[in-house]
Image: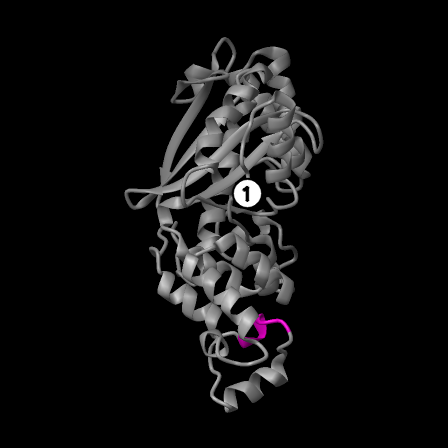
Amino acid sequence: MPPSLSDYERARHLHDGLIATNRNRRVEDVFCGREVASPAGTCYVIESRSAVGLNGRDPDRAASAVLADLTLVPGIGEATGRRLERQGYRTVADLARHPLYCRDAARLLHAVEQGDTRGLAEWIGRRHRRSDPLILELSRFHDAGDLLFLDIETLGLFARPVILIGLGRLEQGSLTVRQYLLRSVGEEAAALTALVPYLEADGAALVTFNGRAFDLPYIGERLTRHGIPADLALPHFDILYPARRRWRGTFGSCRLCALETGVLGIEREDDIPSRVVPEFYESYRRTNNPGPLVPVVEHNRQDIVSLARLFGLLRGDGDRGS
């Protein structure tokens, strides 16, 4: 397609071509997936694998990083921290014997010993910014396979159905992406119900890009709408904040697609802007032609793969997989 076309014009051109080449085909003909059952019904799952490498669990490294920051203890700023270090209080564990700071130091030390990543993230967020690298270090309390890379596609920005749930996990050395694609909006409850066990699993931790503001609250609202009980209080690492801290001013934008190109060197082909995803899905619903779903599924899959790779880079794992 000519580069002079706008993003929307290119998307419409792609849409029309996909409609033409997928007439009289079903979702099952276009996507190699499988139907899965949940207590709320059946839904369709597409699985793919990508080469993404992340370092394994390293709680000692995470604990050392947290305990080395004396300013996490209330009442201690940079100057006081330097003074305390000169007096021999070099870690939070040392402060557990300080007459003034011992109580808060002991509480923080207990949270570290328990590997309470959610509580520690909230603690660090109160003392520092949510972009602080210490927060990502907390993810090392978790096995790499317990990290859930989540991205959703919806029919709108508020109170509209989720149409695609993408979930990535490290399995056997690569990233497995499971995408719960709604063949009809009536499958939303089934897809959400299938997602819940992952979010409630022991040791699970969520990784998103702007998921704190969008994905997780949106899922929570849809679960409530369908009356599906779920505990969403799992540790959550939203890499939008550290990405802005590291790359703001380096690229024209800190949106995921811009970082994907600027940092990972990935140029997508036949991609569509997020804003046209509802239009493409509505076209599928109206025509029963699965062609418009092809770029929606690929857009979501690539978002998850890039999310995992950027997470590794921000955490210092050094993954730049192709």
Q: Name the foreground residue: 224 vs 322.
A: 224
> Which residues are drawn in magenta?
70-74
Q: Name the foreground residue: 8 vs 254.
A: 254
* Residue 314 visible (yes or no): no
- Outermost residue to the right: 158
Residue 317 appears left or right of 217: left
Residue 185 drawn at (x, y percent): 59, 17
Q: Which residue is mark 1?
A: 233
The quadrant holding residue 279 is: top right
- Outermost residue to the front: 99
- The residue positioned 42% from the left and 26% from the top of the image is 46
- The residue positioned 55% from the left and 42% from the top of the image is 233
Compared with 183, 24 (above or below) is above
Dominant SS type (magenta): helix
Q: Quadrant of the N terminus?
A: top right
The quadrant holding residue 49 is: top left
